[in-house]
Amino acid sequence: MATVLFFGPARDAAGARSAIVEGTCVGEVVAATVTRFGEQFAQLLPTCRVWLNGDPATPDAPVGIEDEIAVLPPVSGG
């Protein structure tokens, strides 16, 4: 279980700033997040970066109750 933080368009697609999501690794948490927040979120996810506690995450990285997973869509600026 982990806290998932949503930013920018990911926040809009999820309709939330954060959520507590079940899973023992990043991949499980992300999959559960897709199931929970639906097709619009699922379509956005391939363009996003996923970070665990401030570092780039791999799907097999273990997560616990105090961990935070951030879903970061691409950012443009000038």
Image: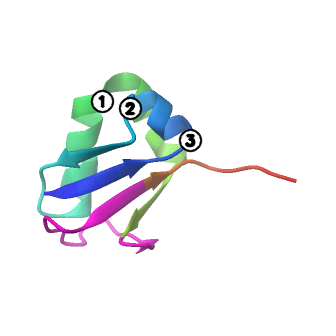
Q: Which mark is residue 14?
A: 2
CA gap between label 3 and label 1 equals 15 Å
- Comparing 57 with 17, the one in front is 17
Residue at mark 3: 8
Q: Is residue 61 magenta?
A: yes
Range of the magenta residues? 53-70
- Which of the two labelled residues, at mark 3 and mark 1, occupies the earlier sequence position? 3
Could you tell me the amino acid type at mark 3?
A: Gly
The answer to whether the residues at label 3 and label 1 have Cβ atoms under 8 Å apart is: no
Q: Residue at x 39, y 33 (%)?
A: 42
Visual colour scheme = rainbow
Question: Do the CB atoms of the residues marked 2 and 1 lie less than 8 Å apart?
Answer: yes
**Amino acid type, callout 1:** Phe
Looking at the picture, does residue 47 appear above or below residue 54?
above
Percent x, y of residue 63: 18, 68
Residue at the image point whose x is 45% and y is 29% from the top: 13
Q: Secondary structure at mark 1?
A: helix
Which type of secondary structure does the marked residue at label 2 adopt? helix
Q: Are marks 2 and 3 in contact (CB under 8 Å)?
A: no
Give the SS element for disc 3.
Answer: loop
Residue 31 locus on image (x, y percent):
24, 45
Q: Magenta part mainly helix, strand or loop?
A: loop
Q: Amino acid at mark 2?
A: Ala
Measuring 25% from the left and 55% from the top, which residue is drawn there? 3
The residue labelled by disc 1 is 37
